[in-house]
Image (cartoon, rainbow, N blue to C red):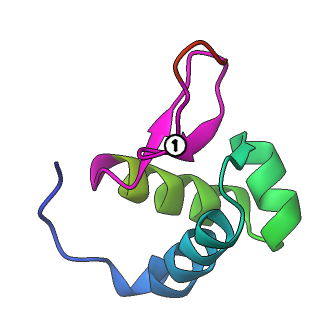
Amino acid sequence: MNTSPLPSSIRIPVQRICSEYLEMPGLRLTNAQAQRLLGLEAAVCNDALTFLADAGFLRLTPGGQYARMTDDVIGRS
């Protein structure tokens, strides 16, 4: 688990991504889908998703989707 502080450059995108995942249990998005849904630039979205995965909030499924770590993603891709 990443213990580094949240970089200010991605603070707001991280908060927005967390909100979406908390409001919609079972949500799974690819990086590209998250970019479109939230209107984020590719690099910013990638950095935010990577931060959340490193922090243990999200996990990357074998199918390339980001899902909440606490959601049941076993058997899904």
- Give the secondary structure at mark 1: loop
Residue at 52%, 19% in the rendered image:
74
Coordinates of residue 13 in the picture (x, y in percent): 58, 77
Q: Which residue is under mark 1?
A: 71
> Can you say whether 28 is above or below 35 in the image?
above
- Crowding at label 1, few (<14), some or many (≥20) Cα neighbours within 10 Å? some
Residue at 58%, 69% in the rendered image:
22
Q: Principal SS element in the magenta part?
A: loop
Residue at the outermost right position: 36
Coordinates of residue 77 in the picture (x, y in percent): 67, 18
16 vs 6, nearest the viewer: 16
- For this view, does 29 lie left or right of residue 8? right
Coordinates of residue 10 in the picture (x, y in percent): 48, 77
- For this view, does 21 lie left or right of residue 1? right
Residue at 64%, 25% in the rendered image:
64
Q: Amino acid at mark 1?
A: Asp
Coordinates of residue 61 in the picture (x, y in percent): 55, 25
Quadrant of res 29: top right
71 vs 37, nearest the viewer: 71
Q: Is residue 6 magenta?
A: no
Quadrant of res 41: bottom right
Residue at the outermost left position: 3
Span shown in magenta: 54-73
Residue at 68%, 70% in the rendered image:
20
